[in-house]
Image (cartoon, rainbow, N blue to C red):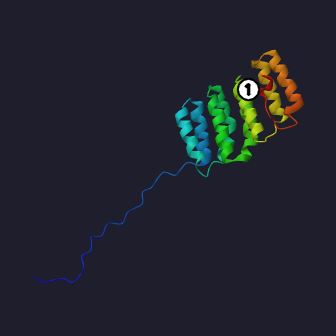
């Protein structure tokens, strides 16, 4: 028997072939799917897509989807999701807050969610965002539709003296 001087080498593996994966959906498509899932009352799936988009670099598509997503949540009674979405997006993209908070105020006010609408306006004030005339009008319309006459009058009085001209400190002072 002959002795070999070569070191033992493990057998070679066949070259691994990369597996083909389905292409990740475009961020705009994913945002559209998220809105469609929310409108179809599949909130768990919509929330999953939201989280995936929020934590990717594709988050800029989310403010574009918000004008459809927030009203869908309002129509379906998911009011907490509205403010949560606005807060999450504003934390990631502070510039988006200028468009998102007025949209939230409008959606919540149209649904008669006055306390949550006030919360959104207070958050605007804490962030140093000015309440523009359209948001102030939505605020007054919400109180005209769902509040009492004294509340509506107070909202109008507050809007005409404070809302449009300076950042909001507190709206709860008259409610």
| Residue 89, above or below 158 | below
Q: Is residue 76 left or right of residue 149?
A: left
Q: Within the image, what quadrant is residue 156 found in?
A: top right
Residue found 82% across the figure and 24% down from its top = 155
Q: Residue 20, how many percent across, how many down?
A: 45, 55
Q: Is residue 7 left or right of residue 131?
A: left
Judged from this view, the residue extending furthest toward the top is 149
Q: Report how many numbered discs are placed on residues in the image.
A: 1
Residue found 74% across the figure and 47% down from its top = 95
Q: Residue 142, how many percent across, how many down?
A: 77, 23
Q: Within the image, what quadrant is residue 84 found in?
A: top right
Q: Residue 137, how many percent across, how many down?
A: 83, 28
Per the image, the residue denoted by label 1 is 109
Judged from this view, the residue extending furthest toward the left is 1
Q: Within the image, what quadrant is residue 51 found in?
A: top right
| Residue 62, above or below 172 | below
Residue found 27% across the figure and 70% down from its top = 11
Q: Quadrant where the N terminus lies?
A: bottom left
Residue found 58% across the figure and 41% down from its top = 50
Q: Nearer the viewer, residue 108 or 49?
A: 108
Judged from this view, the residue extending furthest toward the front is 173
Q: Is residue 111 left or right of residue 157?
A: left
Q: Secondary structure at mark 1?
A: helix
Q: Quadrant where the C terminus lies?
A: top right
């Amino acid at each position: 028997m002959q002795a070999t001087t070569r070191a033992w080498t493990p057998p070679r593996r066949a070259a691994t072939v990369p597996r083909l994966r389905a292409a990740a959906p475009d961020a705009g498509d994913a945002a559209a799917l998220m809105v469609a899932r929310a409108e179809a009352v599949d909130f768990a799936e919509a929330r999953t897509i939201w989280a995936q988009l929020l934590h990717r670099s594709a988050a800029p598509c989310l403010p574009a989807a918000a004008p459809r997503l927030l009203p869908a949540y309002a129509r379906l009674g998911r009011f907490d999701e509205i403010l949560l979405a606005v807060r999450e997006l504003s934390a990631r993209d502070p510039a988006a807050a200028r468009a998102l908070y007025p949209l939230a105020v409008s959606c919540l006010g149209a649904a008669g969610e006055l306390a949550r609408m006030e919360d959104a306006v207070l958050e605007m004030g804490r962030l140093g965002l000015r309440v523009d005339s359209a948001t102030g009008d939505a605020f007054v319309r919400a109180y005209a539709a769902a509040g009492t006459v004294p509340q509506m009058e107070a909202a109008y009085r507050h809007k005409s003296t404070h809302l449009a001209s300076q950042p909001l400190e507190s709206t709860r002072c008259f409610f």
